[in-house]
């Protein structure tokens, strides 16, 4: 059984496994479209709030902005993969390279910024004195530039090798590696597992374990909310990304010849489609994790919608008007150093 596993799309091209392709042609476009809409709305709201109310005055704000941009890069590629899953690649060789590359840049940078935000929380809570010097806008911009450089560098092979070409009367968009393609596929899978799960998981586990240890010595209602937020961040990250990385590792074993049974290979193709889509939904949840669970952001969103005439007229017409306390923008702003509600 010959299968193509690309980060943006998982489509079987073998005639003997046409049921997998048929399954994907119905299953993937619907879910990709849903992720696109939710991710676009949620992350656009994050960016609007950051610029209009927060004004990017802290390291946390810088990371949140970059995380939202990463997720937007990620979701902008989904309409292309959605059409590809339903039919074939019709957008040409240039867009094949660009969309594949942008997708992977968004994939890596999004995970790296989640990791940086874990370090940011670790410094703010565990090393509060050091945080006064280290957690500045300047350092936030500098580390963000490093993340983008690493994400872009890690994605360069996708830009170089991705091609649009005919295969069994079907136009595909996938990497076409020179020489021993199996070796390249193995290296690609290892890169995703190491950069996309192992390193971030290790860093996040260390940071959050130290945070929880510190917070347990200082019990308060506010600190307990911070612990719940931390657990939510970790659980959502592992739940949405671990299944995909496990299936990706099993596909690696298939490439190495460890897994040879055709039925297992077919099941892995189905699992890849399901776990990949589950992982995609994580980009929709980032705004929920880092903002919607915080009271400040709820207030910002209410103010944002109050300032827009069309939504306000809609709510009045539907009888959904709620009363808000009139508060100035500056009254919501707090410095992020030691602020447990910054998430």
Image (cartoon, grey):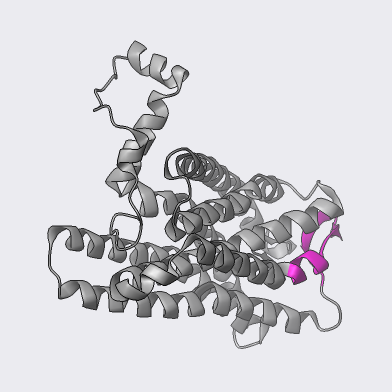
Name the quadrant of the N terminus. bottom right
Which of 224/99 is in front?
A: 224
Highlighted magenta segment, given as a residue range: 156-176
132 relative to 78 in the view: left or right: left
The picture places residue 92, in percent across and down from the top left corner, at 85, 50
Tell me, yes or no, if residue 3 can be seen here.
no
The picture places residue 22, in percent across and down from the top left corner, at 64, 51
Tell me, yes or no, if residue 143 can be seen here.
yes
- In the image as oriented, which residue stretches furthest toward the top? 317
Q: Magenta segment: does it hold 162?
A: yes
218 relative to 253 in the view: left or right: left
Name the quadrant of the C terminus. bottom left
Residue at point 24% right, 73% down? 212
- In the image as oriented, which residue stretches furthest toward the front? 133
Q: Magenta segment: does it hold 167?
A: yes
Query: Total of numbered circles in the picture?
Result: 0
Residue at point 34% right, 62% down? 337
Residue at point 43% right, 58% down? 60
Which of 209/274 is in front?
A: 209
């Amino acid at each position: 059984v010959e299968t193509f596993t690309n980060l943006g799309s998982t489509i079987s091209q073998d005639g003997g496994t046409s049921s997998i392709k048929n399954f994907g042609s119905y299953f993937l476009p619907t879910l990709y479209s849903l992720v696109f809409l939710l991710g676009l709305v949620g992350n656009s709201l994050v960016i609007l709030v950051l610029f209009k109310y927060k004004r990017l005055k802290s390291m946390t704000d810088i990371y949140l902005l970059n995380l939202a941009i990463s997720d937007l890069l990620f979701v902008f590629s989904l309409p292309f993969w959605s059409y590809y899953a339903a039919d074939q690649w019709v957008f040409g060789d240039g867009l094949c390279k660009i969309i594949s590359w942008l997708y992977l840049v968004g994939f890596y940078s999004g995970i790296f910024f989640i990791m940086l935000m874990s370090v940011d929380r670790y410094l703010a809570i565990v090393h509060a004195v050091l945080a006064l010097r280290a957690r500045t806008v300047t350092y936030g911009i500098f580390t963000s530039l490093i993340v983008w450089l690493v994400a872009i560098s890690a994605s360069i092979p996708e830009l170089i090798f991705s091609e649009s070409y005919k295969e069994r009367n079907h136009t595909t968009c996938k990497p076409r590696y020179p020489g021993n393609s199996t070796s390249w596929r193995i290296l690609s899978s290892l890169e995703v597992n190491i950069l996309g799960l192992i390193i971030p998981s290790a860093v996040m586990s260390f940071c959050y374990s130290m945070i929880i240890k510190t917070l347990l010595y200082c019990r308060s209602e506010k600190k307990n909310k911070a612990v719940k937020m931390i657990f939510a961040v970790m659980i959502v990250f592992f739940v949405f990304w671990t299944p995909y990385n496990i299936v990706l590792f099993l596909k690696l074993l298939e490439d190495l010849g460890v897994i040879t049974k055709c039925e297992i290979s077919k099941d892995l193709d189905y699992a890849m489609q399901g776990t990949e889509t589950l992982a995609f939904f994580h980009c929709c949840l980032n705004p929920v994790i880092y903002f919607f669970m915080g009271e400040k952001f709820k207030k910002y969103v209410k103010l944002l919608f109050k300032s827009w005439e069309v939504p306000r007229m809609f709510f009045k017409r539907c009888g959904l008007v709620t009363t808000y306390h009139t508060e100035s923008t500056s009254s919501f702003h707090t410095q992020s150093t030691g602020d447990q509600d910054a998430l």
